[in-house]
Image (cartoon, coloured by chain):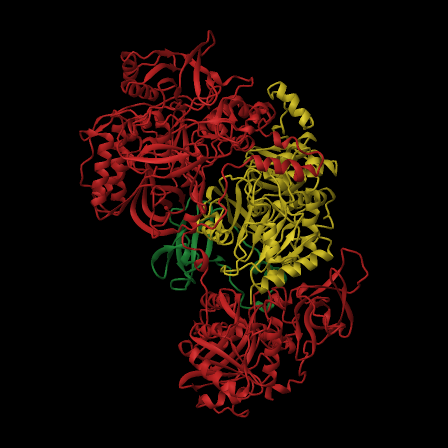
Amino acid sequence: MIAAFRIPGAGRLRQAETASFSFDGHSYAGVEGDTLASALLANGVHLIGRSFKYHRPRGFLSAGAEEPNALVEIKRDSARKTPNVRATVQELYDGLAAQSQNRWPSLSFDVSALGDIASPLLSAGFYYKTFMWPKSAWKNFYEPKIRAAAGLGVAPDQADPDHYSARFAHCDVLVLGGGAAGIAAALAAAETGVRVILVDEQAEFGGSLHFESGAKIDRQDGFAWAQSAVAKLKTMDNVRVLSRTTAFGYYAQNFVGLVERVSDHLQNPGRDLPRERLWQVRAKRVVLATGAIERHMVFADNDRPGIMLASAARTYLNHYGVTVGRNVGVYTANDSAYAAAIDLKKAGVGVAAIVDLRDNPTGPVIEEARALGIEVNFGRAVIRAGGKLRVSSMTVQPKNGGGERTIPVDAILMSAGWTPSVHLFSQSRGKVAFNDETKRFVPGAYAQDCVSVGACNGTDGLSATIDEAYAAGAKAAKDVGANAKGNKPKVDASENWSRGMLGAAPGAGADTTVKAFVDFQNDVTAKDIRQAVHEGMRSIEHVKRFTTNGMATDQGKTSNMHGLAIAAETLGKPIPQVGLTTFRAPYTPVTFGSIVGHARGPLFDPTRKTAIHPWAERQGAVFEDVGQWKRAWYFPKAGEDMHAAVDRECVTVRKTAGLFDASTLGKIEVVGPDAAKFMELLYTNPWEKLEPGRCRYGIMLREDGFIYDDGVVGRLAPDRFHVTTTTGGAPRVMNHMEDYLQTEFPHLNVWLTSITEQWAVIAVQGPKSRDIIAPLVEGIDMSDEALPHMSVREGRICGVPTRLFRMSFTGERGFEVNVPADYGQAVWEALWAEGQKHGACAYGTEAMHVLRAEKGYIIVGQDTDGTVTPNDAGLDWAVGKKKTDFVGIRGMVRPDLVANGRKQLVGLKTKDPKVVLEEGAQIVGDSKQAIPMTMIGHVTSSYWSENCGRSIALALVAGGRDRMGETLYVPMPNATIEVEVTGMVFFDEKGERLNG
Amino acid sequence: MKKYSVFAIAREAMRGHKGWEEQWSSPEPKKEYDVIIVGAGGHGLATAYYLATVHGITNVAVLEKGWLGGGNTGRNTTIIRSNYLYDESAGIYDHALKLWDGLSQELNYNVMYSPRGVMMLAHNVHDIQVLKRHVHANRLNGIDNEWLTPEAAKEFCPPLNISRDARYPVMGATLQRRGGTARHDAVAWGYARGASARGVHIIQNCEVIGVKRAPNGAVTGVETTRGFIGARKVGVVAAGHSSVIMNMAGVRMPLESYPLQALVSEPVKPVFPCVVMSNTVHAYISQSDKGELVIGAGTDQYVSYSQTGGLHILQHTLDAICEMFPMFTRMKMLRSWGGIVDVTPDRSPILAKTPVPGLYVNCGWGTGGFKATPGSGHVFAHTIAKDDPHPINAPFTIERFRTGRLIDEAAAAAVAH
Amino acid sequence: MLLIRCPYCEEERPELEFRNAGEAHIARSANMAGESDDDFEKFFFIRSNPKGIIYERWRHMHGCARFFNAVRDTVSDRFLLTYKAGEPKPAKLPGASK
């Protein structure tokens, strides 16, 4: 069955191919190739939405991406609901389900439309002037009410099951816009053989050829020419053609973001298809062929459903075969709307009258309209529209006043002229220039390697457009080194118009209470803009922000120029002096999903795992995130909570031994004849005299004298150091070293290699550690004499090479076994088997933290925080006193860094040994003081120590080392905890166990 | 200044809103003023307002190269909070927060300060340590800030993904209930209206191109695109351009200016009740009264005055947003933009006298200046009026970089070990 | 995303491969320990932060890993020149407006 407003034989759709769909629960029939808008119009449905502020009934204004009114929710299933979809862009598929938004209880009866009656109170910026009393009412009453009334659609409430894809692309010539101009430019460039990408936002190429029935190119109908030209381009290997693809952002150095809508138009998109695909394109040259957008006329009640842009009505007729009414009126200030009237009349639709604001226009379209018997009125204005849910009449008056005449109509087609789409040009940081004669902003000075052609460049007429575009395409190719050799398309017939008017028409009312809409979605009227100017807003940016003109989801595509003109007129200034608001990306709204692409879940950020990770997983380890690494936190046995597991691990390490995966520690190899000199400069410690085979704890500062990183460094040979860093610090330490080596000390003959991923590191700590390792080691004398604490040897373990460090971060006899990462798990398992014989355990990072705290070993980044000097941390001993230079040597003696009273790292013992302090808790000297209290420090590390049988803590405390034995206080919300300042070593103070 | 109220609106509604007075006047510049403020952003206008209201100094010009409120004031994500770690920072931001509460009434302009709560997420053990350190320090400073479990965080912000399977699961959060948002334009306009009504000249489209000094070094005025304007006190409040202006006076600054981007989604019905920040995954989000999700991104890595930035920066931010709020992938970005933020080496502002007599500077707010607007203006006005800093801004000197007495909130957060 | 020419690789590559490393041509003193507080402040904290031509350092982090220098206009973000670390500040700039 053919829908009531579908005209047999009109348009390009195959009307037999039907698709059923629903809107607000009503079922309708459309045809394949329809948009939701054309399908609804074919069924006579104009009422599609409600406006933002006044909840006025609204219909379709346009047939494209500039649509401010026709926003609906499309629901595929409960998780795939998309709000604010433009019905004029959404392609129809069988079973499509759409809902109207921002109305209650129904679209035709919306309670909030009462706001329309109260609208005199809701003037521009009214909310800045009221809702201030009483003070608390804003948060508790007014704001919630306003928020509930605002917003358009409803955000999805479930995770999105669809996926999004991403591509990078490079090309020689990127053509944005696939109308006549873009196709011509693409042809010219493509024929030279350079790499071309042609992009258009619509399903089919052709741009305004969708509706321009008068265009003939190469002896074909314009739209047919566009299809055959694009078909030809698609066959070329050097050309990529992307439809349904919006160029949304033009960034620095010809970097353009595109979003391709891959499956939103499909009834049953396969699961392997992404919903959308982001293209990030770097082009040597860009051709902007983005066309122009028709403007509406600004007059009273110009928002009634059925009132639309003339070109939209033409598109619905000439492309979709749908008439937007039976008895239409036309209101125009330029020629283009005549063509709409003519096309409709020829299709058998009644045209009540053309009302033309101009006094005595002449031209072929006017003659043709008259010849078809259409009533044409010059020098007249439509001063208001009648009707509510649908326009019913237009009232016409001579523009300088006089008798009114009301003409019944069921649609009004309007055109105030065309606004060149300079959005992307402006985003490219090009400067627009105002052409006073044609009342248009057109591209002026360029900032990037791009060129505008056709309507977006203010070029009128198809012939001139194709000439210009073809030449631009050829030149772009030539600029990248290729010569043109094709044939320029020949224009046999075209339509031609330009000019028009900007700002309010007489029907907008000079003052009064009429609502002549400039920005439909945000309900901004001509009066609002005048009011803003009266209130002192002189910059167009202020007018925009105060009235919200151009800030709706259409971003002012139809409203900005009118708003500017009305502001300029009110100010009595020329338009360029009032300025144009900035165009910002995106050109049309872009889903978060398309920008995010694959970067979700596990791919949000890479996960780094050690070679031993799978073993730990099998043992049921709980992991913690440290930077990008997953580290085994603790290894709970059945029935153990974290506390019990950690206690057991800590005790076992000190009783027998424990294995710990230390692979995440950063490792850098410093090699070369000047390696020791380099180390001298990068670390506070002296290195020249460190014997090969020995290790030293090194401190790295930034130039400002604060601790940057630390780690044990082994000297493998006179010219070779094996440096370890903190887990999180590895990349920045490497960068820091490279920076100094390459730029400050390039005379040093040194190479740096990151070896973090090359070596797996297994710490074996505890009294039995040597017994566990020794049976597996070849070629290394493990005796205390041959391998004392803080030494390193190369040899083999389990048959693979090892760098065996004798070192300890637990205070026990300890080793760190470095093996090539590929053998990490095998060696671990061998050590584990040996360890089992001695009752050793695996321990995680939490036990590691407790064990080192028992010994007062610091963790950079936890016990220090970027404001701590070596002296503050009690590490003065690690600063080479005789050294004349190292990074940080000057910074660390600045006045405030050597002043008295600095915070120093100390130990804390709670008076009640069972009480464990909270890390981050603040310390005061006087617990009785009132808030705000004077805080003298904070707890940096705090644990229950099963080995000590009490809690232990480290803290940074002002003048801490002079406070030994002092009682301080940690005020907590419910109680104040008494603590005693102590040394930092809580266990084995003499350090005897290192050789125990 | 005619008072704004619902009655005024009703009165004006009767006559087509034609009786409103200008919110601020646009006078021609005089030859000389007592004080010139360079920069008509929120901080500069607030400074002028408090010079007039607190110190009785009304012969003041605020010079603006573009349009008032058009810099970072009109480009930020409007987050307000005061739960900073150090006493100095907590002091100035909480001073501001107390002024926010009541600012609409003070200015008779609804700045829509909305204490909807600011939540900061912890994603690992290190985050917990750092955020709890803040909670404890804030409590003893009398600043509200509380610790929430992941479950409590989700109750406060239902869209939050607290799944343990997330790449960086939420392990807890802090909540400052007095934190929230305000309407950025209204802040600039409200201060402009209040200052203008008291005689302050706000001169837009007037770019400072030179700072004049007497032989003894003291400031005598500024050269502008609209001619020389004299003043013996000049306060520079030019955000990203502060070092450019200070260079004109011969003062080199410890500042670098970076692009900072933000974006909003299309408006939707209320879905996001508070402000959520995550420094670990770099995401900052709230929902405006209009219904737009307002999302802040990080800075680009290079110095720039272009007010634009790279798409990959927004991408990184939206990655994080969609990771924490997986239902938002179908939401659409409506508008994105960039500002220029001036960053000091310790990420804390400079509000101080300068080595040049009569020259004062208020800059270096980095990515967080909006929240400080009332407090910053209030103490900077004091500094200019008295030629001596207010106790609250006394620590925020230029000299601290020489002595090492930094106020390093960023360093205090350190980097995960 | 900027497009940056690495003077070592002699190729233009996307910004994602690079890390900015701050202002260029700020030499570290050969006698660091003897610097005054003022000189240290100038060296470590004070920056020219120009609106216009900046001399800055970049590292081709995910490429050859070399540090190099660039001349860029901070208003347009356009690169005028890149050159190797250690080379002197160029006396003449191609296509510089000021």
Quadrant including the C terminus of chain C: top left
Q: Quadrant of residue A972?
A: bottom right
Is residue A250 or residue B222 the one in the foreground?
A250
Q: Quadrant of residue A76?
A: top left
Residue A67: image location, x then y, percent: 42, 32
Residue B299: image location, x then y, percent: 51, 51
Is residue A307 or residue B343 the one in the foreground?
A307
The residue drawn where x is 22% and y is 42% is A233
Q: Is residue A292 above or below residue B141?
A: above
Quick check: A775 left or right of B194?
left
The residue drawn where x is 62% and y is 81% is A651
- Chain appearing in red on the rendered image: A
Quick check: A991 left or right of A389?
right
- Chain appearing in green on the rendered image: C
Is residue A201 or residue A504 the one in the foreground?
A201
The residue drawn where x is 58% and y is 37% is A148
Q: Is residue A707 above or below residue A324?
A: below
The residue drawn where x is 46% and y is 43% is B333
Name the outermost residue toward the right: A928
Quick check: B166 left or right of B86?
left
Quick check: B103 left or right of A642?
right
Is residue A542 or residue A740 the one in the foreground?
A542
Count of numbered badges drawn on the protein: 0
Residue C97: image location, x then y, percent: 42, 44
Residue B179: image location, x then y, percent: 65, 47
Q: Is residue B122 above or below residue A962?
A: above
Asked if one can make out residue A843 in the rendered structure from this viewpoint, the answer is yes
- Chain appearing in yellow on the rendered image: B
Name the outermost residue toward the top: A403
Asked if one can make out residue B364 in the rendered structure from this viewpoint, the answer is no
Q: Quadrant of residue B2?
A: top right
